[in-house]
Image (cartoon, rainbow, N blue to C red):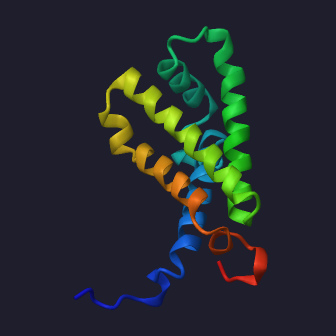
Amino acid sequence: MIPKIHPLFSTKNAPGFLRRSIAIGFLSAVASRLGLWGQYSSGWTNFTKYMGDLLYFIPSVLIAPLAIIVTFLETFIGITILLGLFNQLSAIMGGFLTLVFAVAMTIANGVKDPLDYSVFVFSAACFTLAYLDKTATTINKNNNH
């Protein structure tokens, strides 16, 4: 028998919790590279260096523009999912973006890093959100998620 848990963790609230967690995850990553987490931030320089390490097979002149594009996409995905707008599209974009990141991490550093940082799990969470009932994951239709 499964013990009864707090209503906050019910299946009714799970999609909203998933949506907010994904959004905050994307926005936190952006905040870190922009220095908004203070001393705990990774910073832009470290982010672009890490991207260059992961994408060693891409000409170095393309790394900075790619870093800007990725940061823009993560910001867009985070904000739209947080606000409950374009959830399915944004979640699919987030799923593919994090899957590409996980594969690049695996190729460059081995599978341990993307597993330790739960990048595959984050990607799976995005794809799961994309395919949940849209009314359960969006602010449309006057729901409480």
Which residue is nearer to you in this view: 24 or 35? 24
Number of numbered callouts drawn: 0
User: Residue at position x 74%, y 73% from top?
Assistant: 139
User: Residue at position x 46%, y 26% from top?
Assistant: 104
The location of residue 71, given as percent across then percent down, is 68, 37
Which residue is nearer to you in this view: 32 or 110? 110
Q: Quadrant of residue 112?
A: top left
Q: Quadrant of residue 44?
A: top right
The single residue placed furthest to the left in the displayed view is 1
3 up-or-down from 124: above or below? below
The location of residue 117, given as percent across then percent down, is 39, 44
User: Residue at position x 62%, y 58% from top?
Assistant: 23
The location of residue 30, given as percent across then percent down, is 64, 44
User: Residue at position x 61%, y 10% from top?
Assistant: 60
Q: Quadrant of the C terminus?
A: bottom right
Q: Quadrant of the N terminus?
A: bottom left
The location of residue 141, given as percent across then percent down, is 77, 79
Which residue is nearer to you in this view: 127 or 74? 127
